[in-house]
Image (cartoon, rainbow, N blue to C red):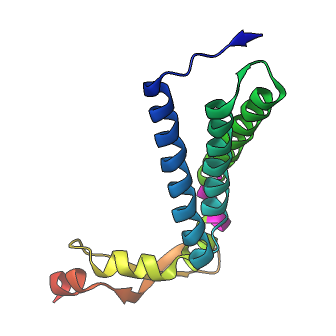
């Protein structure tokens, strides 16, 4: 086994890393409690798992110990959680996923569109018997678009 060298700089960097990762995990955990978003949940768990792995690096007596390997596994699992977030985020592009995202985050979307400077309208398409669009109906318009149309 190789003995680790514990310099003051190393310890300060590792303690700072643990504090920042843990604080971020707590913030995202609170966000999860409010939004119930799976993406925020997995992101929070990923950050916390990586923080646990860094703690093991901070306190490990030497490289190759069970504690050292446990820390590496925790970091690996945290990275898997973060990759899960990336995968889920990129797969939201499906029609069902977008509709679900809009339903879950309706408040934030309304806030976004109400503060836009560009015009935006929500339409319903009117289709003929063959399923081809022939007209549309305005269901909702934002103030900037109303100003443009008037």
Q: Residue 95 occupies which quadrant of the picture?
A: bottom right
Relative height, residue 22 to residue 9 (above, below): below
Q: Residue 12 occupies which quadrant of the picture?
A: top left
From the top left corner, tell me how far across and down residue 140 is, in percent. Answer: 39, 88
Screen quadrant of the N terminus: top right
Q: Quick check: 130 left or right of 72?
A: left
Asked whether residue 94 is drawn in magenta, I would say yes
Observer-nearest of 26 and 100: 26
Q: How many marks do you count on the picture?
A: 0
The answer, for residue 87, to whether it is visible in the render is no
Q: Residue at x 65, y 30 (%)?
A: 57
Observer-nearest of 26 and 12: 12
Q: Residue at x 26, y 74 (%)?
A: 116
Q: Residue at x 70, y 28 (%)?
A: 60
User: Going by the picture, which residue comes out furthest to the right?
Assistant: 66
Observer-nearest of 23 and 61: 61
Relative height, residue 130 to residue 76 (above, below): below
Prevailing secondary structure of the magenta residues: helix
The answer, for residue 93, to whether it is visible in the render is yes
From the top left corner, tell me how far across and down residue 150 is, in percent. Answer: 15, 90
Asked whether residue 18 is drawn in magenta, I would say no
Q: Quick check: 124 left or right of 120?
A: right
Relative height, residue 143 to residue 116 (above, below): below
From the top left corner, tell me how far across and down residue 133 is, in percent. Answer: 52, 74
Relative height, residue 25 to residue 107 (above, below): above
User: Going by the picture, which residue comes out furthest to the top?
Assistant: 2
Q: Residue at x 73, y 34 (%)?
A: 71
In the rendered structure, which segment of residues is drawn in magenta? 91-97
Q: Quick check: 142 left or right of 39?
A: left
Q: Residue 120 occupies which quadrant of the picture?
A: bottom left
């Amino acid at each position: 086994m190789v003995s680790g060298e514990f310099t003051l700089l190393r310890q300060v960097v590792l303690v700072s890393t643990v504090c920042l990762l843990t604080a971020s995990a707590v913030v995202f955990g609170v966000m999860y409690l409010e939004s119930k978003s799976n993406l925020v949940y997995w992101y929070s768990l990923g950050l916390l798992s990586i923080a646990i792995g860094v703690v093991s690096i901070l306190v490990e007596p030497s490289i190759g110990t069970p504690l050292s390997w446990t820390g590496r596994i925790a970091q690996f699992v945290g990275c898997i959680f973060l990759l899960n977030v990336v995968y889920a985020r990129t797969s939201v592009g499906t029609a069902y996923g977008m509709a679900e995202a809009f339903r879950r985050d309706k408040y934030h979307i309304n806030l976004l569109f109400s503060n836009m400077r560009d015009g935006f309208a929500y339409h319903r398409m009117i289709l003929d018997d063959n399923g081809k669009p022939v007209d549309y109906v305005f269901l909702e318009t934002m103030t900037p678009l109303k100003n443009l149309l008037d």
